[in-house]
C-alpha cells in the first residue's frame, strides 16, 4: 500500500500499524532459510483493537446494509486486482510457502475465482423466502443476514487460497472480519487486505493481525465480541479453537487435516494408458507441494495383484522428481515450509521403518545443488511399502512428501481400509468398472470423493470433512451459508386476542 512501511502489516480500522509491542518477525524463504521480509509480530493488544474496529464497523458502519449488488461489484473488483497483481502475488506465495512459481500463480487464479464465484452466488441466491403460513392474514418470510464479526485463522500451505474461501463469502454476506494468517506465511494475506482497501472496502470492515497462534489466534477464538470463528489448520489447534469458542457460544467452522486414501483397483491398470495415468496421478496426489496439502493422497491402497508393478514404477518416478527452489525453471517440487516440518517428516519415516515399512524411494535429505541450497528445508519424495494401519505413519497426518502403500484383495477390504481413519477429508477410487466406481464412492466416508482423478475442487462444490477433518463446509452455497444468520419474520396482518388466559 502507498505509504505502508515494511513492518506495518497490522491493519486496524483502516490504518496500517506496527505491533503495539514493537515486536517484529523475520519471514524466511524455505529454499535457503534466509529472511526476505519482516512483519509485525502482533499480540493480544493488537487483536483487541482489531476486533473493536470490526465490531464498530459492523454495528455502526454501512457495509452490512450495503446492497448485495454493490457488495458483489466490490468482490469482482478485487478479483480484477488479483489478476492484475498475479505475478507479484504468485511470486510472493512461492517464496513464502516454498511452492513452485507456477503453483503460486495457479493459487492466485483460484483466489480470483473464489471472489468471482461468491459475487455471483450472493446475487443469485436472492434475499429471502416467503413461507406459506396457511392464512392470508399472515405474511411469513425467511431472510438472511450477516453473522457479524468473523475471526479467520488460516494455515501456511495455501495461505491466500484458504483465506479467500473465508474472506470472499464473509464479505459477500455483509460481515466484517479480523484475519490472522499463519505466522510463517502471512505476506499474501497482508497484500490481499491492501487490495480490499484499494477496491474501496470501508475502513474497519477488513482487519488483519499478523502474529502467533497462541496469542493472536487464541484471543480471537475466545473474544466475546467475535460472533464466528472460521479456522483452517491442524487437528490439535482446531480442537483448542473449538474449546475456546464454546465459552462464548460462537459459531465455529473448522477445516482440519486429512489422511486421504487413494484406492487403485487392478482393472484401472489393465491398459498401458490406464496404468500410466493411475501412477502419474498417484504421484501428483502424494507429492504436489511436497505433500503439504490437506487433501494429499498420502495413503496408496492398491489391489494386491498389481502392487509390485505399480509401486516399482511409482518409486522410479518419485526418484526423478526435480527438487529445488520454487522459482527455478524446471523445478517440480519445492522445500518443506520449515525446519520443524522437515524434522516431523523425518521422525515419521524413521518410526515407519522401525515398525517394518520397506523404503522404495526417498527417505533422506537430497544432496545440495545450485537450485537446492544446503540450508533449504528439502526432503526427498518418499515411498514406504508394506505399511499397515498400526503404523503411526498410516494413521497420522505427516504433511510432507511421504506415501504409504497398503494392499487389498476385495472391494470390501478396499473400502474398509479407506475408511479406517479418524479423518474424512478426501479420497479417490481408480477403476474401469463404472458400477464399482459408484458403489465405492457411495461407501467412502470422506467429504470429497474423486473417481479416476485426484485433487480437483470446484468453487461451486462444497469442501470440508467428515469425522475429525472438520465442522461445516467452505465453498458452494454452504460456504456462503456459514456466514449468514437465518431469520424468520412472521407478520400478522390482522392481529386479534388469543384468549389463552381468561383474565
Ligand atoms: P496449525 O494448526 O499449526 O496452524 C493453523 C493456524 O492456527 C495458524 O494461523 C496458527 O498460528 C493458528 N493457531 C495455532 N495455535 C492456535 C491456537 N491455540 N488458537 C488459535 N489459533 C492457533 O496448522 P498449519 O501447520 O499452519 O497447517 C497445516 C494443517 O492445516 C494441516 O493439518 C492441514 O491438513 C490443515 N489444512 C486443512 C485444510 C482443509 O481445507 N481442511 C486446508 C489447508 C490446511
Image (spheres, rainbow, N blue to C red):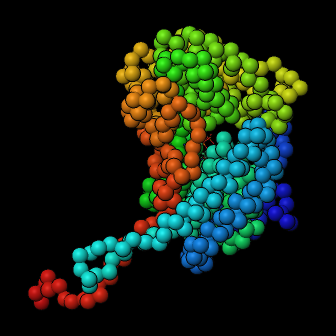
The C terminus lies in quadrant: bottom left
The quadrant where residue 195 appears: bottom right
Q: Residue furthest left?
A: 502
Taking 466 as reference, is 88 left or right?
A: right
**Position of residue 97 measured from the top left corner of the image (x, y, whole percent):** 73, 41
Please identify the quadrant where the N terminus is shown. bottom right
Which x, y percent locates residue 48?
62, 64
Q: Nearer the viewer, residue 223 or 367?
A: 367
- Rendered residue at 57%/33% (across/down): 454
| Closer-to-camera residue (195/477) | 477
Q: Position of residue 248 (x, y in %)?
A: 45, 60
Whether 218 is drawn above or below 5: the answer is above
Q: Residue furthest right?
A: 370
Q: Quadrant of residue 169?
A: bottom right
What residue is at 48 percent from the left and 19 percent from the top? 267
Residue 239 horizontal side relative to residue 171, left or right: left
* Along the viewing direction, whichever of 201 and 114 lies nearer the viewer: 114
267 to 212, vertically: above or below: above
* 112 to 434, vertically: above or below: below
Left or right, 186 with respect to 305, comes to right
Q: Say which of 167 and 277 sits in front.
A: 277
What residue do we see at 74% from left, 37% from top?
A: 99
Residue 255 in the image: above or below residue 177: above
Residue 454 visible in image = yes
On the image, the x and y values in percent for residue 156 come to: 67, 43
Image quarter for ligand 1 equals: top right
Amino acid at each position: 500500500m502507498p505509504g505502508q512501511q515494511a513492518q506495518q502489516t497490522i491493519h486496524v480500522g483502516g490504518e496500517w500499524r506496527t505491533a503495539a509491542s514493537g515486536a517484529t518477525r523475520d519471514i524466511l524463504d524455505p529454499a535457503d532459510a534466509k529472511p526476505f521480509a519482516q512483519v509485525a509480530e502482533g499480540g493480544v493488544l493488537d487483536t483487541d483493537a482489531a476486533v473493536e474496529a470490526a465490531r464498530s464497523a459492523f454495528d455502526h458502519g454501512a457495509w452490512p446494509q450495503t446492497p448485495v449488488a454493490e457488495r458483489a461489484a466490490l468482490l469482482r473488483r478485487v478479483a480484477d486486482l488479483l489478476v492484475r497483481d498475479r505475478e507479484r502475488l504468485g511470486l510472493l506465495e512461492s517464496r513464502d510457502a516454498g511452492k513452485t512459481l507456477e503453483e503460486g500463480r495457479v493459487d492466485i487464479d483460484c483466489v480470483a475465482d473464489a471472489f468471482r464465484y461468491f459475487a455471483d452466488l450472493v446475487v443469485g441466491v436472492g434475499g429471502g423466502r416467503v413461507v406459506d403460513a396457511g392464512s392470508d392474514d399472515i405474511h411469513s418470510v425467511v431472510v438472511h443476514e450477516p453473522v457479524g464479526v468473523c475471526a479467520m485463522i488460516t494455515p501456511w500451505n495455501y495461505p491466500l487460497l484458504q483465506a479467500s474461501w473465508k474472506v470472499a463469502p464473509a464479505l459477500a454476506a455483509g460481515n466484517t472480519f479480523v484475519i490472522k494468517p499463519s505466522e510463517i506465511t502471512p505476506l499474501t494475506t497482508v497484500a490481499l487486505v491492501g487490495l480490499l482497501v484499494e477496491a474501496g472496502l470501508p475502513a474497519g470492515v477488513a482487519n488483519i493481525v499478523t502474529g502467533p497462534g497462541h496469542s493472536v489466534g487464541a484471543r480471537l477464538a475466545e473474544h466475546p465480541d467475535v460472533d464466528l470463528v472460521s479456522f483452517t489448520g491442524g487437528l490439535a489447534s482446531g480442537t483448542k479453537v473449538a474449546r475456546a469458542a464454546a465459552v462464548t457460544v460462537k459459531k465455529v467452522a473448522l477445516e482440519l487435516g486429512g489422511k486421504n486414501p487413494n484406492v487403485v483397483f487392478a482393472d484401472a491398470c489393465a491398459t498401458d494408458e490406464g496404468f500410466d495415468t493411475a501412477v502419474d496421478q498417484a504421484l501428483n496426489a502424494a507429492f504436489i507441494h511436497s505433500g503439504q496439502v490437506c487433501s494429499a493422497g498420502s495413503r496408496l491402497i492398491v489391489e494386491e495383484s498389481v502392487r509390485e508393478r505399480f509401486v516399482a514404477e511409482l518409486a522410479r518416478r518419485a526418484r526423478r522428481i526435480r527438487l529445488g527452489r520454487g522459482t527455478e525453471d524446471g523445478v517440480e517440487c519445492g522445500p518443506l515450509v520449515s525446519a520443524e516440518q522437515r524434522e516431523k517428516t523425518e521422525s515419521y519415516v524413521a518410526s515407519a521403518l522401525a515398525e517394518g515399512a520397506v523404503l522404495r524411494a526417498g527417505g533422506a535429505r537430497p544432496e545440495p545443488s545450485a537450485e537446492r541450497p544446503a540450508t533449504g528445508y528439502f526432503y526427498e519424495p518418499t515411498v514406504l511399502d508394506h505399511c499397515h494401519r498400526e503404523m503411526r505413519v498410516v494413521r497420522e497426518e505427516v504433511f510432507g512428501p511421504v506415501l504409504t502403500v497398503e494392499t487389498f484383495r476385495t472391494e470390501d477390504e478396499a473400502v474398509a481400509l479407506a475408511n479406517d481413519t479418524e479423518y474424512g477429508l478426501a479420497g479417490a477410487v481408480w477403476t474401469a468398472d463404472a458400477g464399482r466406481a459408484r458403489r465405492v464412492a457411495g461407501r467412502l466416508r470422506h467429504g470429497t470423493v474423486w473417481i479416476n482423478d485426484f485433487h480437483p475442487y470446484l468453487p461451486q462444490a462444497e469442501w470440508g470433512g467428515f469425522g475429525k477433518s472438520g465442522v461445516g463446509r467452505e465453498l458452494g452455497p454452504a460456504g456462503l451459508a456459514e456466514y449468514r444468520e437465518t431469520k424468520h419474520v412472521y407478520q400478522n396482518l390482522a392481529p386479534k386476542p388469543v384468549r389463552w388466559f381468561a383474565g
